[in-house]
Image: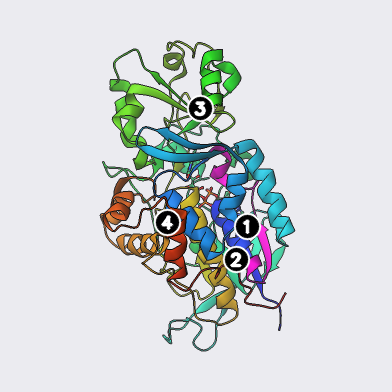
Amino acid sequence: MKTRRIVVVGGGWGGCAAAFAAARAGAEVTLCERTDMLLGTGLVGGIFRNNGRFTAAEEMTVLGSDVFLLMDACARHTNVAFPGHAHASLYDVYRMEPEIRRALEKAGVNVRCRASVSDIRMEEASGDTTGDGSAAPRRHIAAVLLRSGEAIEGDAFVDATGTSATPANCNRYGSGCAMCILRCHTFLPRVSLTTKAGVEEWDGCREDGTPGAMSGSCKLMKDSLAPEIRKELEERGVCIVPIPVSPSTGEKKLSLKACQQYALKEFAENVVLLDTGPAKLMSPYYPLDLLRTIPGFENARFEDPIAGGQGNSMRYFGFARCTVTMQARGQVDNLFCAGERGGAMVGHTEAVVTGELAGHNSVRRALNMPLLTFPTSLAVGDYIESVTAMMETEEGRRTKFTFSGSVYFERMRRLGLYSTDPEEIRRRVASSSLAGVLAKPLLPR
Ligand SMILES: Cc1cc2nc3c(=O)[nH]c(=O)nc-3n(C[C@H](O)[C@H](O)[C@H](O)COP(=O)(O)OP(=O)(O)OC[C@H]3O[C@@H](n4cnc5c(N)ncnc54)[C@H](O)[C@@H]3O)c2cc1C
């Protein structure tokens, strides 16, 4: 059988998961990332398996994904509790990226860093290529074009370009460029395939209707903190330091946050630190002079964003409309979305769930096979179905969805989908008859 070529654009967690899934399915995969490192915002994240993310990670592993096992292998701490969150694992942000890159290369993925996609080449598609039986006239993407001028052709494409990396949005809706890990001024701003292909997009917004949201945590250099804070962080994975002044300044920051699961009073009244290698400060930003008034933080210094005393990256611009198969809606027939690009789905776990499905389905699309959906008897299936439905409503477009808190975790619990029992989760996936589906090749290797 003729080989099938899948091109994934964007090397964050969504894109990496899509590339793994497409490679497992037997395709020839190229992953294009605009910067010199994979993982995107995952380079400064680290929290997984907290609350409902545990269930999602276990379900995905039984479905055949190996990505959470790679995260587990890089965990600095497991079973960490912090306000509103139970049984979190924290991966080491310094070890994770090189591990993922090696694993992708071992899986046969052609990893292309400093490969910034600036445009696409479209062609008319013939016949019913929609996969849903409709005869709507469609176009398909033939190739992506790098800024260097090089064209990379493919049979199907995954847009995993995220929703940040646009300095104009940080300037207009945030506090200017905070010099975050996305390094837009060096590697140039995000360009998304969905925009180029004319897929409908919209911006998320805050409670007051302002577009976008500010990323909810930053990183401090551990060496700049008092030894007793560092010791506690390294021993327990978490250190909670009460703020010895009125919490009003902190409380004001809550509504700015991208992560509604951390919009709790405890995060305004305390400095909450997690050990992901650096000290992850669970606040979108913290004025440095104020932070340095807190005992133990007299020498504090930001690692990411470098201007974390002033602001953080702005995200949630240009979500694209998708179906439950993660196929982009509209007139393009061979484009899938992974991670934040596919809707207001926040977090590494969420990006891996949607990325795995997008990558797997891109191969099915290239082979003209029926597309896979995750059943709603699984948390991952219910998540994608309910969130894509919510994305069609005004209210849904104002909300962010994660397995780890806020409205979706509440729904998970209400429906009895939250479980921390791996055996129960294994049985649940087995009864869907989909165990191992993401590991089975669709093409001979
Ligand atoms: C500071 C911060 C801390 C966070 N902490 C956590 C956490 O602890 N736990 C958690 O679960 N979630 C966390 N999140 C959220 C989480 O990181 C994201 O929701 C998730 O990882 C998004 O993955 P993604 O692949 O969709 O997008 P991104 O991570 O944004 O990746 C998109 C990638 O696409 C690349 N790209 C864009 N345009 C192009 C182009 N034209 N050509 C090639 N490449 C392109 C970008 O360079 C980037 O690498 C955090 C986010 C931030 C910003």
Within 10 Å of disc 3 (Cα), the crowding (few <14, some 14-19, many 20+) is some
Q: CA distance from mark 4 to mark 2?
A: 18 Å
Residue marked by disc 4? 319
| Magenta part of the chain | 22-44
Kind of residue at badge 4: Phe
Residue sitting nearer the eye, 419 or 403: 419
Of marks 3 and 1, which one's residue comes earlier in the chain?
A: 1
In the image, 123 versus 239, the foreground residue is 239
Q: Earlier in the sequence, mark 4 or mark 1?
A: 1
Q: Using the image, determine if residue 443 lies above or below residue 223.
A: below
Disc 4 to disc 1, C-alpha distance:
18 Å
Query: Which badge, 2 or 3, is on the more N-terminal residue?
Result: 2
Secondary structure category for the residue under label 2: strand
Q: Which residue is mark 1?
A: 117
Q: Which badge, 4 or 2, comes first in the chain's sequence? A: 2
On the image, numbered disc 2 is attached to which residue? 120
The residue type indicated by label 1 comes to: Val
Question: At label 2, which amino acid type do we have?
Answer: Ile
